[in-house]
Amino acid sequence: MDPTTTSPNINYATPRPGAAITAADVAALVAAFRAADRKPRLEYVISCAPGLEALLTAAGFLAEARHTYLLCTPSTLTTPPTLDHLDLQEPGTDLQRAALISAQNEAFGGDPVASEADVARLRNLQGDGGVAVMAVAGDGTCVGGGGAVPPTGAVSEVAGIAVRTPYRRQGLASVITADITRRLFTTGTEIAWLEASGEESWRVYERVGYRPAGQRLYIALT
């Protein structure tokens, strides 16, 4: 749980794969979220805790979504041609981090202004071994980007792939995704995973070597 934001996309729980979970555990989890003034919420791979959904449902949780996740390994990664008019780089200053976050927020229909907490969160992610990549046009404008969380057990999630509207339909999302994934693999990550938000993004990710692997559940107590 992050004390700087109430966003449910940042404040959530994930069960330990194979752990024995009881109704008492669910009650304790709810109490922990309530104590922190956060919505009780989980995101997890269903096969890692097959009996958990029934316990959560019995406690009043409702499923928000079920998504297929995709995996990529060094042997399946395909690197698309680079785009001559754009440069891919890791943000090294807070000004660059703010530009990347603004581009992502704008692309996803949110507030384009990056807060100090957002910038600090990205800086910490990079410091902990995560990856951030921004696509920069010739005039210095950040037109898109994305990132990946610090690896755990040689596994990392790629997320936030975004391209501003005027720069779409040029293959940039594929280039960004492949570059982030490549950077992960050069530092020892063995598996990268992500989720596709729709049919179009699914094609983007499959084009660079991601393959369907299972289902994730998003579930919360209102």
Image: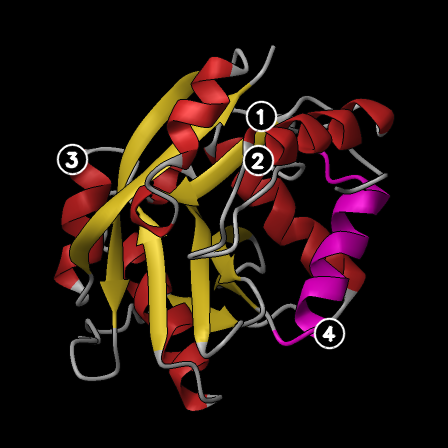
Which numbered mark, 2 or 4, is in the foreground of this view? 4
Please name the amino acid that badge 2 sits on. Asn
Q: From the image, state whether disc 1 or disc 4 is nearer to you.
A: 4
- Percent from the top left, x then y, of residue 132? 56, 65
Q: How is the image coloured?
A: secondary structure
Question: Magenta region: which residues?
Answer: 113-129
Q: How dense is the environment of label 4, judged by Cα within 10 Å: few (below 14), some, or many (20 and up)?
A: few
Of marks 3 and 2, which one's residue comes earlier in the chain? 2
Are circles 2 and 4 on residues that touch, CB within 8 Å? no
Q: Amino acid at mark 4?
A: Gly
Closer to the chain start, of discs 1 and 3, is 1
In this view, the residue in front, 202 or 42, is 42
Q: How far apart in space, not on screen, are marks 1 and 3 (Cα)?
A: 22 Å
Residue 141 image offset from top left, x and y in percent:
56, 53
Horizontally, residue 187 falls left or right of residue 217, namely right
Q: Which class describes the residues within 10 Å of circle 3: few (<14), some (14-19), or many (20+)?
A: few
Residue closest to the eye, 30 or 145: 30
Q: Which residue is mark 3?
A: 199
